[in-house]
Image (cartoon, coloured by chain):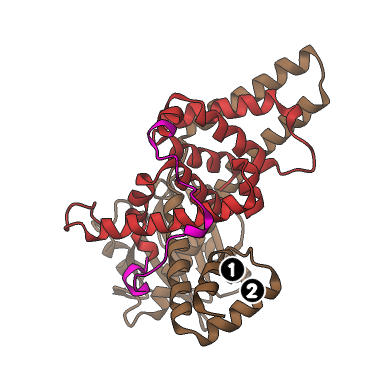
Amino acid sequence: MPLFERLYNFACWLTQDRHEAEDLVQETFAKALKGFSSFQPGTNFRAWIYKILRNTFLTSRTGLKAAGTEPLDLEGDEENLPQVNETPESILLQRSDWQLVQQALEQLPVAHREVLLLCEVEEMSYQEIAGTLAVPMGTVMSRLSRARSALRDAVRKLQQKPQGAASGD
Amino acid sequence: MVCENWTEKLDAYLDGELPAAEARALDEHLRGCASCAAESLSRVQQKRALQAAGQRFTPDPTFRARIQQSVAARQSVRWSRLWFPALATAAVLLIAALFPITLNRRSRGEQLLLSELADLHVATLASANPVDVVSTDRHTVKPWFAGKIPFTFNLPELQDSAFTLVGGKVSYLNQSPGAELIFRVRQHQISVFIFQERALGNIQVDDAVQSALSFNVRNWSHNGLAYFVIGDASPQDLDKLGELIKAAG
């Protein structure tokens, strides 16, 4: 996927609304053009433009609302990482479970959703993610770990729902 | 080291972020530890599932055009006013980020289409009943398709050529029915697919010999129908068969 489509996909996941995503992408491109002097040649262009998109989202109405309704203690201390106790067989995810995964991802707080998307879909390195989110590498790692187990939990809950509650295949 | 210490590093390992020495050590551990290996598999599955599920939204073409226009317009206005090297670079970078869109989309769509056709061809070769109408006679094969596909086509006269018609069957591409004709030249089997152009969506395939997954492909469009000749025969053979079919109109 070329960058424009990737940005749009990411914007849709953040805003969860196609119209807002379009506005967000458009504003991102406008800001990128206008503020290009803040881009330092030799640094990562992709991380730079994602950062603009993300900051634009966070200051938008939806972004502020999301920040306001989400728990602030997503980080916690790193010692306290959740333990993985379930049998791996029970949570094996197939690629075909994508609908389930999409539903689960929708339910996650923005902070978890975005770090998962940047890592898995955008395939950014930890360093790029750190640059995009403007947080230290250690935070990226702990947030990713939390986000992953939150996603696992959300998927498991959806799997346990009675048939018919989840959308069909 | 106890397993707990390893599982802590598993994410970084699978993300390719673990330093080489540690990655090697973890690699070694995974070979001998069933529970860590299973945990690792489960995480890989989650990564893959998320990778597929995350690519969900595609911008619609009107929005794409709007952005392209707005970037281009901004660029020309600013440039006419005063010339900023940084701005020029910005515009170039953004345009570069935008322009491959159509190119990549096309080549990606094209690739998918060709590999789909190659799959159909291979499935036919592998089948115990490769064709549904078995006949070397074009006057048998053509009428067989009547009522089965929403278009008609002409088959070439093969009398003085190296090709023989084996038969045909109905095939599907993007949920649209079309014809698959099987020809033989020496020991090679060649599939000729005929679909309505609209079955291809907006994918444009260059009119040239291409190879899809080691098969040769020849394709063209005529009267709203898209023709694909695919097989392991030489490009020259495909060209010849293509010319014969084109001549039949």
Q: Chain of mark 1?
A: B
Residue at 64% x, 73% y: name it. B23
* Residue type highlighted by circle 1: Tyr
Q: Residue furthest bottom?
A: B32
Q: Residue furthest top?
A: B81
Going from N to C along the chain, the mark reached first, 2 or 1, is 1
Q: Which chain is red?
A: A
Q: How many other residues sit within 10 Å of disc 1, few (<14), some (14-19) or many (≥20)?
A: many
The answer to whether one can see residue A120 in this image is no
Above-or-below relation of A81 to A90: above
Q: Nearer the viewer, residue B138 or A21?
A: A21
Q: Which residue in the structure is indicated by mark 1?
A: B13
Q: Secondary structure at mark 2?
A: helix
Q: Chain of mark 2?
A: B
In the image, residue B189 lies at what x, y percent? 48, 77
* Residue type highlighted by circle 2: Ala
Above-or-below relation of B171 to B109: below
Instruction: State which region is magenta.
Output: A67-93
